[in-house]
Structures are given as structure tokens and as C-alpha cells.
Image (cartoon, grey):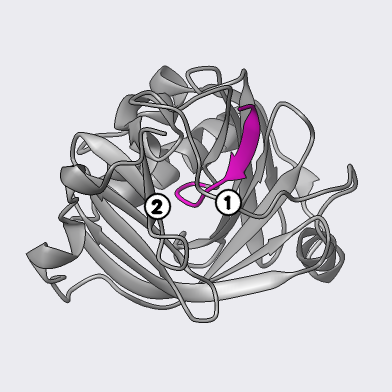
Amino acid sequence: MRHLMLVLGLGAAISAASPAMGPASAQMDILGGKKPAPAAQAIDKAAPPARIATQDAAAAVRRANAYFNGITTLIGDFTQSGNDGRKTSGTLYLQKPGKLRFEYTKPSPLEVIADGTSVAIRNRKLATQDLYFIGQTPLKFLLKPNIDLARDTKILDVTQGPEVTSIKIEDKATFGGTSRITLVFNSSDFSLRNWVVSDPQGFETLVALSNVDLRKIPDPALFRINYERTDNN
């Protein structure tokens, strides 16, 4: 069964005919349309960025690397919006290396969990779980212990405005083809503000962060995957 799943974690978009560890059956929302998400448009209007000189662009990439590599744990709220304008929200938990959980607020039945090896996408309502290799999703860039955006991705563009600095990257190591991800940082302290992922079909998802805590340590139980629950139908 061919399906499209837009999942979180540097805007992780997974497009595949089947998961890495078995056919998929989780019923997830398919985001329609080709235009940018309304939330993404709103951010651009609020603080229009401008391209910067090559030297300044390299400095911005170094600051982005320093931000990601300085994180060992993260707990924060997220809001996800897609091309159709619908929004979902929840809590993000991160523990480097390799562990992550996106816990969606009800009525959404979804959970996305990475345990260092695999990414599990759970649907609590349907009691399904699909597994993917962590290295085949853009989630790896949020989870790697050491990130070099210039080495690990192709940098397409760097823009800077009074409020935000944006770095657009391309990731070819994803299911279904190349994904493009725009990382948006607060210009003042270069903390990650939001990201927008565009998958090979042109669908876009924006994920905005708030109430981020880089000191609190998440409960290790949040990152456990029950492999016996994997759906193999």
C-alpha cells in the first residue's frame, strides 16, 4: 500500500511504498495542496529575510551547528500545521543520542518515538505501530550527537532578517526521494524557532516550538518501543 506520512523531527517527511520493517497500515492524515502552509506564509510576512554574504552564511551555519551540538536534552511544546491549515500540537521530548518522542495532544491518536535505532509511529486509536530505520528519516539530524549541516546535508540557501535567520537544507537520504527542510532560528540567540519540511511531492509541514527547556531530563520510559506491537499486515 503506497502512503504518504508527514512526521515530525526536523519536519521529517517519510514517503514510501512500505516501511523499512514491514508494510504500513497506520492511518495518518494526508496533507493536500501544493502551496506553502499558512503558518509558514505568516512567518515570512512578519519578518521577511534577506540573503546574506557567503562569509555571513557560513557563520550562520556554524552557529546552527553549535546550537544543535550543544543540546543533550530538550522538552518543549510543538504546534504542527499543514497545507490544509489544520493544526495539531503536543509535547516534544529529546535525549541525545538518538532518542525522541512527539506526543500529540488528544484527540490526535498519534505518537512518534525514536529509541536510538528505530522510529515507531503509533496510532493509539487503531492500535497500530509502524517501524522505520532511524537513518532513513530526517529525524536523524535532530538526534545525531554531532551535526555538521554542511557535511551532512546540502545547504541551499541562508537568509537573515531582524528577527529570524533561516537555513534551507536538502536531505536525499529519505524514503521516496529528496526532502527540503528550512530551519528557522531566532536571530538574537540562535535558538531553534520552527522548521518547515517540503517532501518530494511538494507537501509542506511547519513545526513551531515553544516553552523549550534544555535542562530538564526526560523520563527514559518515554523512548521505549514495544517491538511486539509492530503491525505486519
Q: Quadrant of residue 123?
A: bottom left
Instruction: Check disc 1 and report the residue beneath it.
Output: 27
Name the residue rendered at 20%, 34% in the picture.
117
Q: Which mark is residue 181?
A: none
Q: Residues within 10 Å of mark 2 (few under 14, many from 20)?
A: some
Assess whether mark 2 and mark 1 are in contact (beta carbons under 8 angstroms).
yes
In the picture as drawn, the residue positioned furthest to the left comes out as 220
Q: Which residues are magenta?
A: 1-10
**What is the three-letter code of the residue carrying label 2?**
Thr
Overall secondary structure of the magenta stretch?
loop
Was residue 4 drawn as part of the magenta stretch in this picture? yes
70 or 162, nearer to the observer: 70
Q: Which mark is residue 128?
A: 2
Q: Residues within 10 Å of mark 1 (few under 14, many from 20)?
A: some
* Quarter that holds the N terminus: top right
- Is residue 35 rendered to the left or right of residue 102? right
Tell how many labels: 2
Name the residue rendered at 83%, 48% in the picture.
32
Name the residue rendered at 16%, 70% in the picture.
218
Q: Give SS at disc 2.
A: strand
156 or 56, nearer to the observer: 156
Residue 182, percent across and down? 63, 43
Residue 141, percent across and down? 38, 37
